[in-house]
Image (tube, rainbow, N blue to C red):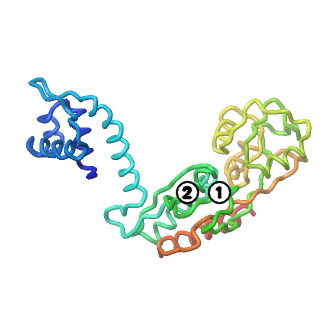
Amino acid sequence: MDTELARTFLVVVAAGSFVDAAQKLHITQSTVSARIQRLEELLGAELFTRNKSGTTLTPAGQQFQRHAASLTRIVEQARQEIGVVSGFRATINIGGRIGLWEDLLLRWIPSFAAAAPDVAVRAIVGFEEDLMQGLIEGRIDAAVMYTPQARPGLKVELLLEEQLVMVSTRRNAASVPESDYIYVDWGAEFFGHHSLAFPNFSGARLAANVGWLGLQHLLAAGGTGYFPIRLIRESEARGALHRVEHTPEFRIQAYLCFSNKIESTALELALATIRRAAREADLARH
């Protein structure tokens, strides 16, 4: 079905008449009528009841409204995800956990733009399950995450190792979680190490599955928690955060995932520059 027919139908519904719809679409009323007539012929049902005051939906029209909205939304989403932005030769879709966008992928964007000014980037934030599904379906070209799953046709490559340290807004904070402790879920591996290190830990007043959320709360309201060194470096330098002495440090790995078959020079360059950004982040940590 021509999505222009569905879009015209939705504009008529919103405008309440063929005349007003024509004005919104910047076409003639006869063109609107022809499109709706064509749509009704395709569906084999009358969609509107016409009267002097405008148009109202028939029962069939009410049913089709849901489908028309879904159809136009899906097509627009597909255009955004796989279409080439005007003025650029290609578009790449890069995904990542929000904690890996912060200070890593966000730093990568300008360096990639300098290396490939004619390639547009669609930045996607998500958790591992959504990112993996996007890679499998081809909606995402490459993604950076902590706990990927092996899937046929996808390559999983170690990108960097995060060093997690306990920090606090308080100087000389206790070396065990106290009432102001913020627990961030950094994945199953972190959970295992954390449980062994703090066997008496029974839960935190605030638990977050997004590191950025935990860190922002920590800086705003105070407290203690585990965060990657690269995320707390600036706050530590200005004295807003302090490392808690005599506490274990944990390490978690971040991975770069992409298709085994790379058919785009733009994606090859994106992968190379992401790897370079990760090396620079690792050097800065030391």
The amino acid type, in three-letter code, at marker 2 is: Gly
- Tell me where residue 240 appears, x and y as whole percent: 71, 42
Nearest the camera: 33 or 145?
A: 33
* Nearest to the observer: residue 230 or residue 125: 125
- Residue lying at 22% horizontally and 35% vertically, measured from the top left: 47
Is 219 rendered above or below residue 115? above
Which mark sits nearer the N-terminus, 1 or 2?
A: 2
Which residue does the image show at 24% across and 49% down from the upper left? Answer: 4
The picture places residue 258, in percent across and down from the top left corner, at: 58, 66
Say which residue label 2 marks: 95
Quadrant location of residue 170? top right
Q: Quadrant of residue 89?
A: bottom left
Q: Quote the CA–CA distance across marks 1 and 2.
A: 8 Å
Residue 145 shown left or right of residue 91 in the figure: right
Give the answer, above or below, for where 38 lies relative to 286.
above
Whether residue 149 is situated above or below residue 69 in the rendered picture: below
Question: For the residue labelled by badge 1, is the local secondary structure a helix, a strand or a loop?
Answer: strand
Disc sitting over residue 145 in the figure: 1
10 Å crowding of disc 1: few (<14), some (14-19), many (20+): many
Residue furthest to the top: 53
Report whether 229 appears left or right of 63: right
Q: Position of residue 232 (x, y in %)?
A: 70, 49
Which mark, by number, is residue 28? none
Q: Are marks 1 and 2 in contact (CB under 8 Å)?
A: yes
